Every structure is written in C-alpha cells, then in structure tokens.
Image (cartoon, grey):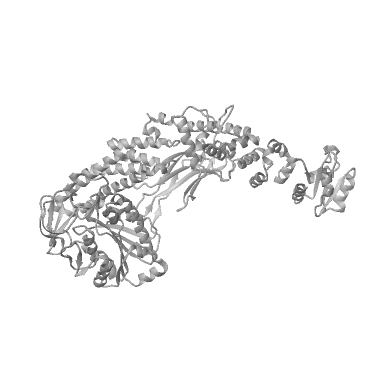
Amino acid sequence: MTKIKAALQKRFKKHRVLFWYDDKGEFREQFEKLSIKNVEKIHIAGNEFAIKYRIHKIAPKQQFLLYFTTPKPANEENWLLDLELAYDVFYTDQQALFLQELGLGYHFKELVGEHLSFFGNKERLEKLKELLDVDETERALKYKILAVVFKTKYTNLETYIHAHGTACADGADGFDKELERYNLAKFYWKEIANRYNYEKEKPSIYDFLIEIFNHNFTFGGKTNLKKEASYLLALWKDTVQYRPSFGKISAKIAADIDVEGQLQTATIDELIQEDAFKIIDYKLIGDLVGLIREETMANEKVLKYIKQRENKFWYSDFQFLYQSLHYATEMIALVRQYGQQQYASFEEGTLHYSSTLQEIDYTYRKFIWNYRQTNQDRILADLAEKVEKIYATDWLLTYNDNWQKVVDKLAEWPTQTRKSQQRFFLTNVQPILDKKQRVFVVISDALRYECGVELTKKLQGENRLQASADYMISSLPSYTQLGMASLLPHKKLTVKEQSDTIVADGLSSIGVAGRTKILATNSGVRATAILAEAFMNMNAAKEGRAFVKEYDLIYIYHNQIDAAGDNTTSQDKVFEAVENELQFLVEVTKKIANMNGTNILITSDHGFIYQHQVLDNSDFSVSNHKGTVWKESRRFVIGQNLSNDAATKLFKGGQLNIGEEVEVLIPKSVNRLRVKGAGSRFIHGGAAMQEIMIPVVSVTKKKKDTVSQVAIDLIKSSEKITTNILAISFIQNDLVTDTVLPRKIKAAVYAEDGEILSDVFTYHFDIDEGSERQREVKYQFNISAKAVKKYKNQGVKLILEEPVEGTNKWKPYKEYGYTLNISFMNDFDF
C-alpha cells in the first residue's frame, strides 16, 4: 500500500488525472483504503460521460484518480480516450512500479521484465536513477544498468571493460555472475563483438584481454580485432582508477603468452614504442646497458631512446634505471672527449672546468645517486664498474695528473685575485653593503662547484628569484677551518700553532660564536651568524622578520654534505646528502625571501672528491715527509720545517697567505696519504679541481615574475579529421633556458560533450638546443570507431592539458578545433 501511494503521489506532481486499470480487481481493497490529499477517487463503472463532464466542467482544477476493474478498452471503444491521452495511465504490475519509481515510460516494461532481478534492489535503483536522462533509449538504458553493475561513474563500454579487467586481475568473478544473474551477459558481449570484432561461443574477459594485448603488441599472436582495440589499452593506461590493475593483468598475460620468449631476438628499434608489457622495459634497459658498457652506440642515440620511453606507461617504475643509463652514457662521452685535457695556465683550467668540465663530476654524481635508488645491483653491476673505472682512472686521476702540472708551476696560490675565496667578502659582500642593502650569506659545508650549478638551476626555476652562479678558488689546504675563516671579513689569516685552527686578525674563527665576533668586529655593519636549523625554525612572519631587522649582514651555516662524507659509516651516502642539501638550500632561500631578504649569496668552504667504489692500495701515496706535524689528513699536512718527496708538493705559509710560520704539504693529483682512522672515499684538502672549485650563487628577490614555461603549439595541416589516424606535429616554440622552464602536456581528442574520442599522448617538452625543426615532436592519435558513428560531421577538439602543481590533476592549456569527417571506408581493417 505504501509503495502504491508513494508512486501515485509522485505521478500526481506531473498529472491532474491518472487512469488505473485493475481488470482482476487485485488492488480494489487498496484503492478503497487509499487517501491522497487533494485527489478525488472515482471507480469507473459505466459512468464515463458523467465523469468526463465533472472533470472538464464541474471541477476543472481538481485532481482525479480513475479506477477501473475492467480491462483497458480498445481506443475506438474508449469513451475517455482524450483524457487518457492528455494525462497518464498508472500501472500496478511489478515492472510498472519499478518504471514509475524511476520516472520512465511504460514502453520500457519489456526491458524491465527481461532484467527483473536487477530492479529488485532499492540501492541499485537509486544508483540507476542518478544516471537517467529525460529522453532515454533502450540501448542507453541498458548501458546505464551496466554502469551500476560495474560500479562506474561513466556509461561507456571502455570503462566497463576496464572495471571488468580490474576484477579479473584481482581474481574476482563477481561481475561475471551478476551479468548472468541480471540477464545482461548477452547484451554486454554483443556490444564488445560489435565494437572490437571479438566473437566467441563462450566469451570471457580474460580471453578477450589476451586478444587485446596481442593486438597491441608487435610480436603478439594474430587477431581479428578491429583497430579500435588499440584505443582501449591506451585509455586504460591513462585512467587513474584502473592504472594499477592494468599492470596486474599485463603481467599475467605476459607470462601466459610467453612475451619473454618472443622478445629474445627483438631489437631496440622494434621495441622502443611498445608499451603493453612491463618486461619490454627490462629488455630495453638490458640491451642499452650492454651498448653503453661496450661503447658501441653514440651517446646522442642512447639519450634519444631514453627520451622516447619517458611518456610510456611503465617509465615511472624504471625512472631511476633509465636515469642511471642517461648519466652513465653522458659521463662516458664527456670523459672520452675531455679526459686528456691539459692547460697552459691556472686561469685557463679553472675557467674551462667551470664552464664545461664540471659536468663530468655532475653526471657521475647523478649516476651513482640514481643507481643507488634503483636497488638493482645485478643489471647495472657491470656498467657501474665501468663507470667507476672511467671516472677514477680516465677522469679523476688522468685529469688531475695533468692539472698537477699547472699547480707545480705556481709560485704562490692565487689568494689575491677576485676569484679567491679569501677575497669573497671584499668582492661579493662589501659592494652590496656599500649600497646600504641587507645581505644574507648562506654557507653550505662542502658544496662543491658542480653542486652549486645545479642549485642555481633549481633556484632559477623558482618564481621571483633571479639566480646566477660564478666560481671561486678555495684557500689551500681546502679544509673547513680555513675555508670558513676565508669567507669572513679579515685582513690577515694565520694558523694557530700546533693545530689546524685559523685565527682571523687575532680572533678565533671556530664555531658560530667565534664567527659572529669576527663579523661584528670587521664588517663595519650590524652582523651576526646563525645555524641554518635555528634560522629555519623561526616563524618567517613574526620572529624571523624581527630577527632580520636587527642586522645588516647575516651569515647562515649548514653542514650536511661534509657531515655525511667525513663519517666513515655514512660516507657512501654523500650523494644522497647532496640531493637533500640542494633542496634544503632552496627552502632556506625561499624563507629568506619571505623575510624580505633581497640579496642572498650561497657559497662553500671547500669542495670534495668522492669515489663510490672502495679504493685500491694503489690509490694511496707513501709520503716520506719529515718535520713537526701539527695536523695530518688524507689530503694535507700542516706543520713546521716540513720536507717533502715526489708524492707531495710543499707550500710555505706565505705562498698560501696563511702566515709565515707554517708550512703545508699537499699530495699530488688525487692521491691520499695513509692516515689511521680517516675516511678515504670522501676527501678534501688538496689542490684537485673538484676540491678547490667552489660556487658563489647570487640570488636576488624580484617583484615581478622571473620564470615562464615553454609554449607548445601544433602544426595544423587541415581543419578536418578524415581518417581514424590523426597525425599531429607538436612544436616547442622556445628552447628551455634558465628562466624558460620545460612544460609537460597531455593531449587527446574530445567531443563537444566532453567524451574522449582518442588515445592520450603525454610528453615532457624539455628541449634545450636545436632549431625549430628539431623541436618538433610527432604523434599519431587513434580515433575511436564510436567517433565516426556518433559524432560524424560534428566539431571536435584536440585539447592540451598541463599538470596542476602538487596534485595528480590536470588543467586546460590549449585547444584546437576540427570537424570530424571520417569516411565509412575507415571502418574496414584493410
């Protein structure tokens, strides 16, 4: 009774008169007990004319429920036909009640009866109701029933297959049982047959997916599927909800059809665009490792292959492996080009290293860091061994042996030039203070030059920060005490007797307290020093700005790289420490900017040499030096009355500008002295290029935007899409530079109603050299078959999107309009 009353009340919201035919009188008692406000009940029994008169003339605004216990008469015998046609009929059979609850017409009664078991659940009905439109077709209604069954937001066959495939990947057969229970299996598989040409006597989702994957794999078995099958997997890989299940089902199918066996003789060129199976990337990486190790493929070609894998489904799983290959091939190519470099002068060497050769140490560092992230020792072991050998012998040793020839000719260390660390304050800080502007100096212990170059690029990518990098020559020996003192304002540096402690104008330079005193005494302005951790713990808006207002000059110290490298238990993580430090320095710089800091200098006390591989005995020097030793390390000896041999070079204190009473021995090239308890893989203190080259990163806060992203356009050859393949040439308008950043885009063809009609193309445009033609990236979009049937001769759009920073969402970037005019001939797989 309650359900009938509710259904009637709902119908009376739309109609003044309802006809209720109950020819068997099954609901007579319910009718008699029924009471609906403002509705007059009338039992029709041969009184049609009186009723018609009452409805039309006497009560033209009254609502009526007309109840019949006779069958619905034929139209020619129905005296109330005009009223019935003007208003509506209320049915009380089970199918009709479902239809009335959904607000659907009685002509769907047969469909409801066909799938009656589906409609017998209130929760399913509510979900179906949310999907319904005003004008439903029978096929559209069945699609929406499938959407409820597969628990999807979207009513399209691709999504149902993705959901079905996901369940299959998880070993669940619930969808198969529901399709049978609700009598939907025949319709579902017929739709798949029509769309993809998959027809089997006993179809199954796994068998269908095997054919789909075979169709999308160059070496797969022959199938009779339509071209539309390529589009299905492309969409699956791009759907956030179902991406993980794609990987699962792909792995299962790869094992069942023996993809590994089919890949044994495949070439890189045959596989480079393949994206159906994860094992393809294993094969590609394995082949590339061998080619790089044997140096049988040009560096440029290897990098091109790696770039082609960037927009593939599995790339994120292999990112560190591909990046390891990227940096390995670059490093090897650079060493082969520059490993034997020699210089006529000190200035020539430092300038060349700063402009070009620092890239070798950068690529080695990046290789080691990515290699460690892979947790894949076996596949990269031989390549890593080769990289280590080339870096240690062909680069570090050979290059610094040649560099040592320049060092040996020096009459004194260059401490009085503008590039000298000892002139840092006068050259870089004083000119800003003279303008009555506040200066922040951030000193990162052991931030060598190539690390500073990478930091500069990171800062250039931050909006409203302008950054540039220059180099300095550290004091010698290149160790912390001397380097830190050299960066302070001073007139004279000396080594405290019997130690390695540095005194600046009679003041100790040890620790923050000592450096604060030197700054306050010698800078001529309000100055202080602070540890980076304490600075970062300040609230930028309140205590931070109050702190900053008290000073004109603030030195900020941080020690992450050197702390990791000097500890024998953590020296193997020194490159991880560099990665962390670079990000930390970006955050420090941004915080300074938030505290109204405009002028920021980032520098270091010294550089370092690091070799990841454990050293051989041959890497250590036996030095027969004599004299009074104050301090001895792997890379320097400080003392008095020192005598050297062929393994070391002797400097008088005056030659290094650190006092006349001291002498220093520096091991030649990259050799280490045997010192008990000292680490050997991370070292500094000597005159090798990697130890003495340190950065000066100048950062200025700007009021206007300082960065932009490269613009992406496309070359349109036509306004029409006439085949199922849309070939597009994307153009990166500008080269990537320090301030013009890369742009990642995602592109696909969409109908005006938002339905996607093609596969999705994703690409990271980061080209930094070459002509416009070399900045062209081509892609062929596969247009779905439904586009031809549903949207023929309609306008469609190629929409480019870009990522929303910090999320997994995308936002519109550009769009290009086309008319879809695909010939019916394209439906055939010729």
Q: Is residue 564 visible?
A: yes
As drawn, 227 above or below 735 = above
Q: Would you identify the image quadrant in which residue 664 lies?
A: bottom left
Decide if residue 119 is on the left or right side of residue 668: right
As drawn, 381 above or below 33 = above
Residue at x 79% of width, y 50% of height: 16
Residue at x 48% of width, y 48% of height: 801
Residue 789 vs residue 471, the one in the foreground: 471
Residue 260, x across and y down, in percent: 41, 31
Residue 98, x across and y down, in percent: 72, 43
Residue 626, x across and y down, in percent: 10, 55
Q: Is residue 216 visible?
A: no
Q: Would you identify the image quadrant in which residue 696 lies?
A: bottom left
Count of marks overlaid on the render:
0
Residue 497 vs residue 509, the one in the foreground: 497
Decide if residue 775 is on the left or right side of residue 505: right
Residue 237, x across and y down, in percent: 48, 41
As drawn, 631 above or below 372 = below
